[in-house]
Image (tube, helix red, strand yellow):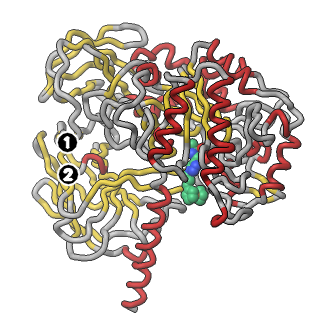
Amino acid sequence: MKQLLIILLLTQFIFIKTNAQETERWDKEVSATPNPSQQWFKDAKFGMFIHWGLFAQAGGVWQGKDYYGISEWMMNRGKIPAVNYAELAKKFNPTKFNAKEWAQLAKDAGMKYMVITAKHHEGFAMFDSKVSDFNIVKATPYHQDPMKSLAQAVRDAGLHFGFYYSQYLDWHEPNGGGNRWDFNEAKKDYQAYYRTKSIPQIKELLNNYGSLGLIWFDMPGGLSKEETQKLIDDVRKIQPGCLISSRVGNGLGDFKDYGDGEIPATAPGDGAWEALFTHNDSWGYSKFDYNFKTPKEIVRLLTTVSSKGGNLILNVGPDSTGQMPEYSVKYLRLVGKWLKVNGEAIYGTTAGFINPQPWGLTTSKPDKLYLHVFERPKDGLIFIPGLYQIKKAYLLANKQPLAFVKANGGISIKLPYLIDPYNTVIAVDLKSKPISLNVDAPVTVSNQYTNNALDAINAHPSGKAQIKSITYSHYFGDWKHTLCLVEMATPEDGAIFLANITTPGDYKVTLEYACPPALAGQEGVMNLNGKNYQFATLATSDYESHKPLLFIKQTIAITTILKAGLYRLNIHPLHNGNELFKLKTIWLEPVN
Ligand code: H79
């Protein structure tokens, strides 16, 4: 029995390792000397990503089989022979494509740049290419180059235009990366692929479509650091101002891209960076994917990324007729309406210097702080810890001045009502820029909110415990990332959370975590308010990056806070054992 358990645990360990390697293929490092013409990118904050290719023709269906998950990977998943997949081109005829409409949609959405797939991993060029006949002009009944008119329309609309180009993966070519079902890996000559297709096509894109704001490389491979630098030099020679994404690989590139669907845990500093999300779960058009983010979710996502100082590039997947999904059109325009009123608090801002608060997030400009209120406290007092002096505060939407009062440890601004359910912005004129962002500051907890979250990011880990971004997926390739407190396996591997509880009363304490069935039942202990609370863990699911990760909410304590003040919550395993759980959040719910 014991041996079986050990084998079980070992195999799990191996799984975790290989999965980690697979998902660490997102290069996030950039050159120490990035392209200096990146200010437009830093100020832009919001861009449109478009995934368009033969995968839109299939929409996730191949020979009657439905492939849920990211549709642009269907060829790889189905190990579809390249010659058969290429047949999709014969029907690809986007007669409803209208470059001006797409440019107008991006503009109406408040986006400042657009990036479209010139060639995704399937190897099909969505532009007129002399390098390969496997392109939209030669191989489809459409016979036109949509990228020509799109590049023009986007620039005419005043936006920056860029191409996505998959530089290494090419499932159509014997020498391209990734296709091992048709072509023998041992016979692949990546250098030949770069020399005869990848680099010549990149040069076509740089030479034939006017000024490019950026080239978005993805999934590097097959090149040494020197060779990657040479590729960058080639780009620079043709278009010196064109920015390059970090996924060019080998720690080079001008701006950082995080993992698909990932936001960095904290503001990463001054360099240019981007978080990339898709509107639903697939990047390419998928017939069954209706999990579109609502306008409120998009506004809050954009705000979250801005509050850490980065850009959000949000993807849409047009279908094979050239039409954008109905809900993308509708919801992006609503986001644009919000930005028309509140754009000042997003464009050209830098990371907010106040920690995330129970009411929302902040962005900043010199002498200005913007409070993005997602949830109004019951008494309407927006408490800003660490800020003691301000000139004035007003609602950004209608300039209505707001009263403010000194509070214990900061300032409170009185918000009479929420003017916008997506995000109500309060602009604050500062006397001087105070303290900088401090992630270690205590979390404000009170009975003014229906619930209070102590998130993994707020933990002060000790021993082997650490805060980690855990990657998993639902269907296939639709990556999700959740920050968790992990590696707590002995009583020494624990964490402390600091809570500034501003209103006395009873609070319910609930742990939200994931725990593999084989490890459930281990005991932990939480110390709060002078008392130890013991618990045993419950089973959720095994962790594997290619599967969903389930979380459970388990209430472990109720406690009476008699006095407002700073409280330390300490949590750790009771005995030596295996990882206790992956702890996402500790909830402190006021009992009113
Ligand atoms: O273009 C979109 C995705 O198609 C692309 N990036 C965004 C912008 C992308 N390419 N690769 N990946 C994302 C991640 C690939 C992950 C992999 Fe796997 C893990 C490849 C092999 C293991 C998932 C599981 C895909 C195939 C098996």
In which quarter of the view is residue 566 placed?
A: top left
Residue 281 appearing in the image? no
Which residue is the site of mark 1? 440
The type of residue carrying mark 2 is: His
- Residue 110 drawn above or below residue 586: above
Q: Which residue is mark 2?
A: 460
- Under 8 Å from ligand 1: the CB of mark 1? no
Q: Residue at x 42, y 84 (%)?
A: 7
* Image position of 31 (left or right of 545): left
Q: Does dot 1 land on a helix, a strand or a loop?
A: loop
Residue 282 is labelled as none
Q: Quick one: label 2 or label 1, which is nearer the N terminus?
A: 1
Q: State the image coordinates of residue 34 (x, y, percent, origin top left).
A: 39, 31
Q: Residue at x 45, y 30 (%)?
A: 311
The one nearer the camera, 356 or 367, is 367
Q: Is residue 404 above or below residue 5?
A: above
369 or 6, which is in the foreground?
Answer: 6
Q: Residues within 10 Å of mark 1 (few under 14, many from 20)?
A: few
Kindly tell me whether residue 406 is visible in this rendering: yes
Quadrant where the image shows the C terminus: top left
Whole-percent x, y for residue 114 in the image:
59, 26
Residue 324, given in percent of the width and then of the height, sits at: 71, 31
Contact? badges 2 and 1 (CB < 8 Å): yes
Q: Relative to the observer, which residue lies in front, 352 or 132?
A: 132
Q: Residue at x 74, y 45 (%)?
A: 55
